[in-house]
């Protein structure tokens, strides 16, 4: 069992510390913005020892990546509704709910910040991005395996460009809420 | 003549100071990320007195907004090619060149950072965003006035969603360069 799996195991002291530390990170990003706090401040806010944070995550960058990955993945699992249209609508609505929720802007900004912040940030952004793209591609592949008609050239990057990117940018620019009709419209246009 | 106009007047000591301060801001964002430097550090890097920066811009937030607005607007003026297709292709290529250039990521990240950073940041982001949307809407209106056929519901926000947002997100996630075929494809899909 590696560190990340242990952190996600439900129940127990390890899981409780993990949840407290994640919440502390999200709060600090909301309050101060990315890059304006230290591991020590995260630990203090979470009510745990600095050494607990360093032992589990190694450094601040790895911790931030873990938070962003957990939020963007665990809370928005890929739906399996039986049709591509249904999968994409459900997925888009999940993402919209996540990124317009209480900590949504903080999570999107964290993902953006990690995506281009030097070698470690880039690596973290790559992991985040690759995981999301793999999940999306699996949804598209499943639809093709079922024999559903899908537009030519429709791949995970097209979903990023025309469903996720508009929602991310609207959240970043404060053009919220994202209405259900708007979200369905993005999927309709794609398909 | 207000402060911003004076700063943009070509030639003279004021313009030289303005250019030096803008470059210092862009450099510091590239090196340290948004929020990790002070007015004093900008002034030192630009080789000017702190008081010169405070006198002209008032505070760091206003200075950052001025830099982002100048970069995103002055360097990407709206084209007028005689057709909507031509205008949008030229505009998209200009934006792509700007945001994939040497300081491009820094400018996009600055715009993102300003767009949701407390009351002043929000205000700055609103200005930035409103100016861009006004320019785009003018291009669309001009096409309709010429009697060009344009898709139903095509407005400045649709250009944001399906041309600008994909390019911004690809730059933020490091999916560069943006190939000319890719950029043209975004415009084709929109029209």
Image: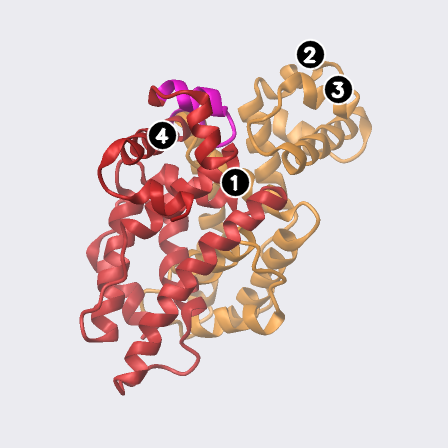
Chain colours: A red, B orange
Pick out the residue farthest to the bottom. Answer: A147
Pick out the residue farthest to the left. Answer: A81
As helix, strand or loop, the secondary structure at mark 4 comes to helix
Question: Which residue is label 3 attached to?
Answer: B44
Query: Dot 1 falls on which chain?
Result: B
**Contact check, label 4 and label 1, Cβ < 8 Å:** no
Q: Which residues are magenta?
A: A30-45
Question: Which residue appears at 63% of the width and 48% of the height?
Answer: B104
Residue A168 appears anywhere in the view: yes
As helix, strand or loop, the secondary structure at mark 3 comes to helix
Question: Which residue appears at 42% of the width and 59% of the height?
Answer: A131
Question: Which residue is label 4 attached to?
Answer: A21
Tell us which disc is closer to us: 3 or 2: 3
Asked whether the residues under marks 3 and 2 belong to the same chain, the reply is yes
Question: Which residue is label 2 attached to?
Answer: B51
**Contact check, label 2 and label 4, Cβ < 8 Å:** no
As helix, strand or loop, the secondary structure at mark 2 comes to helix
Asked where in the image residue A166 lies, by quadrant, the reply is bottom left
Asked whether the residues under marks 2 and 4 belong to the same chain, the reply is no
B141 vs B76, left or right, is: left
């Amino acid at each position: 069992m590696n560190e990340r799996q242990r952190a996600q195991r439900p129940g127990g002291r390890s899981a409780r510390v993990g949840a407290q530390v994640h919440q502390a990170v999200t709060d600090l990003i909301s309050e101060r913005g990315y890059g304006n706090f230290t591991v020590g401040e995260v630990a203090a806010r979470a009510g745990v020892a600095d050494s607990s944070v360093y032992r589990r995550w190694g450094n601040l960058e790895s911790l931030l990546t873990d938070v962003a990955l957990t939020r963007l993945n665990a809370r928005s699992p890929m739906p399996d509704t039986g049709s591509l249209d249904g999968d994409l609508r459900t997925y888009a609505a999940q993402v919209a709910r996540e990124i317009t929720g209480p900590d949504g802007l903080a999570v999107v900004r964290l993902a953006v910040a990690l995506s281009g912040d030097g070698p470690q940030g880039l690596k973290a952004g790559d992991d985040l991005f690759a995981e999301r793209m793999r999940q999306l591609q699996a949804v598209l592949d499943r639809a093709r395996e079922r024999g559903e008609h899908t537009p030519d050239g429709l791949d995970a990057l097209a979903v990023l460009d025309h469903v996720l990117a508009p929602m991310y940018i609207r959240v970043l620019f404060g053009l919220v809420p994202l209405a259900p009709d708007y979200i369905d419209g993005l999927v309709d246009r794609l398909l």
